[in-house]
Image (spheres, rainbow, N blue to C red):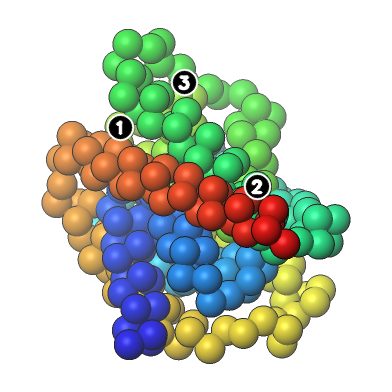
Amino acid sequence: MLPLIYFLVGLLATTFGAAAGLGGGIIIKPVLDLLGQYDVATISILSSFTVFSMAIVSTLKQIKSGAKFQGSNTLILSIGSIIGGILGKEMFVFFINTLANENLAKSIQACLLTILLIFVYLYMSFKSKLPKLCVENGLFIFIIGLALGIIAAFLGIGGGPINVAILTIFFSMEAKTAAIHSVLIILFSQLSKLMSVGLSTGFSSFDLTMLIFMIPGGIIGGFVGAKLNRLFKNETVSKIFKLVLILIIFLSSYNALINLLSFYRV
């Protein structure tokens, strides 16, 4: 049953991720935390590989389908996310080594994720009442990409919901367009993170057995999610986005509480 569970986690997470720009890691991370089979560092790598496989497939399918990207802005964002992914990975390693406690690390990550998602949900719910921006300054765009890459790599989530919110705030993108660009940013940030790990510590210290089930799920999810993104209206994509956010907020809050209680018991 365990391989099937991990395959379904990869499949469902990346299907929603590609369709609504959530990425998939935002679902994979808290679900694997809940299952409790792996440590926080291994969960981060499992999530990154699965989300990266989804992002490749989804982006290629979107390009083949004629999706339009915002030229130089997209390139600058992607470069920023690559550097941010490397910095975020180094920050994550420092964070884990400093705390030296698995339960506390998971609890802090879950708390940070919950807080971020609450802000994203509130923004997406009231964005119609807020002013729209259209940033053109290259340095500011780079800084945005850098911040997104750091958050994605540090929390091990791919950064999808935060990407979508930022793209909507600063570039006035509709839900579907933001979803496509979010997946592209995820592609580069997760690539840089995985390359950084591969070139430094390598992957031999991680138990990646379940990747043979999660990556196929991510590939299928990338195909299906990209197709759904093309078929759905902006309103439908927004509803899926907010519904998944609510579920993950509750799940992350639960994980934060359980791991914090475990920490104090120790």
Q: Determine if residue 43 is in view.
A: yes
x, y percent for residue 204: 71, 87
**58 lies above or below 143:** below
Q: Amino acid at mark 2?
A: Ile
Which quarter of the rendered picture does the N terminus lie within? bottom left
- Among the two numbered marks 2 and 1 on one chain, the one whose residue lies closer to the N terminus: 2
Rendered image: mark on residue 164: none
- Among the two numbered marks 3 and 2 on one chain, the one whose residue lies closer to the N terminus: 2
Residue beneath disc 1:
174
Q: Amino acid at mark 3?
A: Cys
Q: Nearer the viewer, mark 2 or mark 1?
A: 2
Residue beneath disc 3:
134
Q: Nearer the viewer, mark 3 or mark 2?
A: 2
Q: Amino acid at mark 1?
A: Glu
**263 lies above or below 250:** below
Residue under the image location 35 percent in, 62 percent down: 13
Q: Nearer the viewer, mark 3 or mark 1?
A: 1
x, y percent for residue 203: 69, 82
Q: Determine if residue 188 is in view.
A: no
Which quarter of the rendered picture does the C terminus lie within? bottom right
Q: CA distance from mark 3 to mark 1?
A: 12 Å
Left or right side of 79 for 121: left
165 or 112: nearer the eye? 112
Residue most extreme to the front = 265
x, y percent for residue 46: 54, 73
Residue beneath disc 2:
108
- Among the two numbered marks 3 and 1 on one chain, the one whose residue lies closer to the N terminus: 3
Mark 3: which secondary structure? Answer: loop
Q: CA distance from mark 3 to mark 2?
A: 34 Å
84 or 158: nearer the eye? 158
Q: CA distance from mark 2 to mark 1?
A: 32 Å
x, y percent for residue 230: 20, 52
